[in-house]
Image: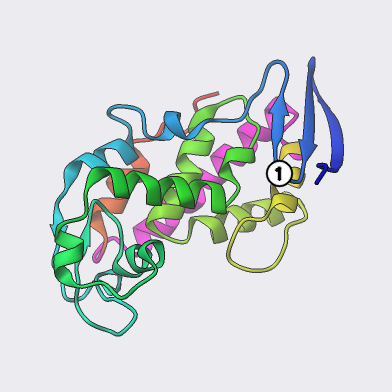
Amino acid sequence: MLLTILAVVSLNDSTIVSTLDTVTVLYGARTVPFEYIIRPYSKRWEKVQDGTFNSAPSDRGNYNGAGEFCGTNRSVAARTLEAHLGRKISKKDMINLDMQTAIQIYKKIYTKNCIDKMVVHQPLLVDMVYNAICSSNGSGRFKEVCRHFQIPVTRGGNIEPADILAFNKFVKNYENEKRFYIEYYNRSESYYKKRAKKHAGLIKWIKDYPTCPY
């Protein structure tokens, strides 16, 4: 089946060709490959390498679809692992979760939410949005910030191709992308501060990003 070109937009001196299945940047701003997200010593790379088993009974991510405790490993929640394997999992499955499987899961999240289609000047914006999706309501926050800037987005939890096309059109202007980054950062910081008692680590997580790398 032939791909349908939905839009061709100008980005300063760059040309972005946007289709339903791909976004190709010819010059200047670019999409960010998953390999950047999982680069050595990046946040997601640290999670994959960590292999620390989370056994907190109060963490809802530690329970499978049947409500049984399985824990979390490499920051992969029980239901996420179940969805990937297509079957009910046990605590043993979670303990035995290897790096390769974790990377496959994280890459699936990356493409499912169309993060691979975001066209940006600063890859840290993509890195921040993606890692927020992996940790807590990042896709919902992405849509909140889009609406703040009157960027039209779809309803529902996942980020859709139409959302990314609208986002790309907005951030073709460098200053707009800068404003989006700052707003997303500030909202993330506020979200985590409200939950600091239960999720103290998330505050450190967002503070690891520069407030404005532009």
Q: Is residue 158 magenta?
A: no
Give the dominant element type of the magenta stretch: helix, strand or loop.
Answer: helix
> Residue visible at 16% across and 57% down?
96
Q: Is residue 174 magenta?
A: yes
Q: Is residue 43 left or right of residue 16?
A: left
Between 189 and 174, the one nearer to me in the picture = 174
Residue under numbered circle 1: 21
In percent of width and height, residue 83 lies at: 41, 67
- Neighbourhood count class around disc 1 (C-alpha, 10 Å): few under 14, some 14–19, many 20 upward: few
Q: Is residue 143 above or below residue 82?
A: above
Q: Which residues, given as a range, are shown in magenta?
A: 170-198
* Residue type highlighted by circle 1: Asp
Q: Quadrant of residue 36?
A: top left
Q: Is residue 40 left or right of residue 26?
A: left
Q: Is residue 81 above or below residue 74?
A: below
Q: Is residue 210 above or below residue 109?
A: above
Query: SS at mark 1?
Result: loop
> Residue visible at 56% across and 38% down?
181
Number of numbered tags placed on the structure image: 1
Q: Quadrant of the C terminus?
A: top right
> Residue visible at 35% across and 57% down?
193
In percent of width and height, residue 139 lies at: 54, 57
In percent of width and height, residue 3 lies at: 81, 42
Q: Is residue 190 left or right of residue 171?
A: left
Q: Is residue 148 above or below residue 115?
A: below
> Residue visible at 24% across and 64% down?
197
Q: Is residue 203 left or right of residue 24?
A: left
